[in-house]
Image (cartoon, rainbow, N blue to C red):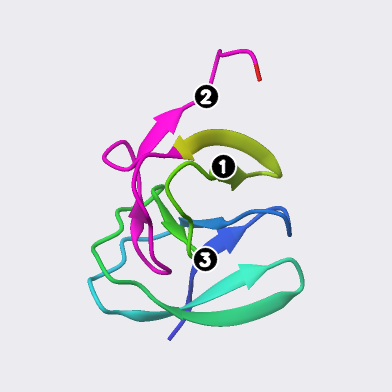
Amino acid sequence: MGIKAIVINPKDNVATAISDIKPNEEILVRIGNEVKQFKVKQEIPFGHKFALTKICKGEKIIKYGETIGIATLDIDIGEHVHIHNVESTRGKAR
């Protein structure tokens, strides 16, 4: 089992896949100097995100330590975080 996702900032509530991840796959995630194990629930394509914590509808999606969107649905740990459950805040006043 190799590292298949990274987290850039400890504030992040999502990880970014650095390779394709299969549904129900247990993977290692690099978070700073630590490596933690997670089980993803859905297919996560390379470059896509998945939740590291439960994210409730209306909560911020944090990547690189910055808000990149708002959850439009409840998102469980290991679920794909993408346009089907996030409204982007890019280019919008915060």
CA gap between label 1 and label 2 equals 9 Å
Q: Earlier in the sequence, mark 3 or mark 1?
A: 3
- Name the disc covering residue 52, or none: 3
- Which residue is found at the position 62% from the left and 58% from the top? 7
Closest to the observer, 82 or 75: 75
Helix, strand or loop for the magenta stretch, by majority? loop
The label on residue 60 is 1
Mark 1 is surrounded, within 10 Å at the Cα level, by few (under 14), some (14 to 19) or many (20 or more) other residues, namely many
Position of residue 6 relative to residue 47, above or below, is below
Which residue bears the numbered disc 2?
A: 89
Instruction: Kindly identify the residue that appears in the image at 31 percent across and 67 percent down.
Output: 21
Q: Is residue 55 left or right of residue 6?
A: left
Please determine whether, in this image, residue 23 is positioned above or below residue 87.
Answer: below
Instruction: Where is residue 42? Give x, y as percent.
Output: 24, 65
The N terminus, quarter of image: bottom left
Circles 3 and 1, Cβ within 8 Å, touching? The answer is: no
Q: Magenta segment range?
A: 71-93
Q: Label 1's element?
A: strand
Q: Secondary structure at mark 3?
A: loop
Horizontal side, residue 37 vs residue 34: left or right: left
Specify the quadrant of the image occupied by residue 60. Answer: top right
The residue type indicated by label 1 comes to Lys
In the drawing, what numbered circle is on residue 16?
Answer: none
